[in-house]
Image (tube, rainbow, N blue to C red):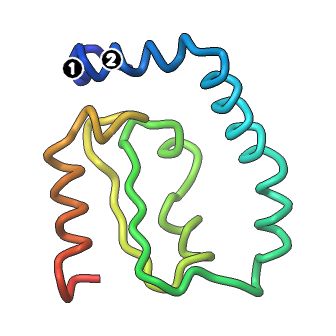
């Protein structure tokens, strides 16, 4: 988390949460499920189920996904009405790093008639 983009209060909240063993355990469980169990659930649904509601996908230009995945292509397999884009000059914490851009993307997606 780049301190230049995240204000002191938000950074303190993140650090306090990361100092709680129960929170760290929950975070690890979430990542573990995403790297294992969730994949088997996705494999069982692939080609048989899809997300039918309008779906918004946002990601940071310098986040973990950008160099490894075509994010929209990955989600296109699952979502019938897909919208999304990369938030420029941001990383994993793009809502904190680029709040105005993130807010604009959300407002556009939820604007009546846009999705």
Measuring from the top left, give residue 83's x and y in whole percent: 37, 73
Which quarter of the image is occupied by the C terminus? bottom left
Q: Residue at x 20, y 41 (%)?
A: 99
Residue 11, by quadrant, is: top left
Alpha carbon distance from label 1 to label 2:
6 Å
Q: Quadrant of the N terminus?
A: top left
Residue 33 percent across, percent down from the top left: 76, 45
In the rendering, at what x and y percent does residue 4 appear? Answer: 21, 16
Residue 30 location in percent, x, y?
68, 40
- Image mark count: 2
Q: Is residue 110 left or right of residue 93?
A: left
Q: Which residue is mark 2?
A: 11
Q: Tell me: residue 79, above or below residue 7.
A: below
Front-most of 23 and 99? 23
Name the residue located 14 percent from the left edge and 46 percent from the top edge.
Answer: 100
Which residue is identified by label 1? 7
On screen, residue 51 above or below 39 = below
**Label 2 neighbour load within 10 Å: few <14, some 14-19, many 20+:** some
Q: In the image, what residue occupies the spot 74% across and 35% down?
A: 29
**What's the mark number on residue 37?**
none
Q: Dot 1 surroundings within 10 Å: few (below 14), some, or many (20 or more)? A: few
**Helix, strand or loop at mark 1:** loop
Write the residue at 62% across / 76% down. 77
Residue 23 placement, left or right of 31: left
Asked if the residue at tag 2 contacts the one at tag 1, i.e. Cβ–Cβ closer than 8 Å, the answer is yes
Helix, strand, or loop for circle 2? helix
Pick the front one: 21 or 97: 21
- The quadrant in which residue 25 appears is top right
């Amino acid at each position: 988390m780049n301190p230049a983009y995240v204000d002191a209060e938000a950074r303190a909240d993140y650090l306090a949460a990361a100092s709680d063993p129960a929170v760290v355990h929950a975070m690890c469980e979430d990542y573990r499920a995403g790297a294992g169990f969730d994949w088997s659930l996705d494999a069982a649904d692939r080609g048989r189920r899809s997300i039918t509601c309008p779906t918004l996908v946002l990601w940071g230009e310098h986040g973990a996904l950008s160099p490894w995945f075509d994010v929209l292509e990955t989600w296109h397999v699952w979502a019938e009405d897909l919208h999304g884009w990369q938030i420029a000059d941001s990383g994993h914490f793009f809502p904190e790093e680029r709040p105005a851009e993130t807010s604009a993307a959300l407002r556009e997606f939820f604007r009546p008639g846009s999705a």
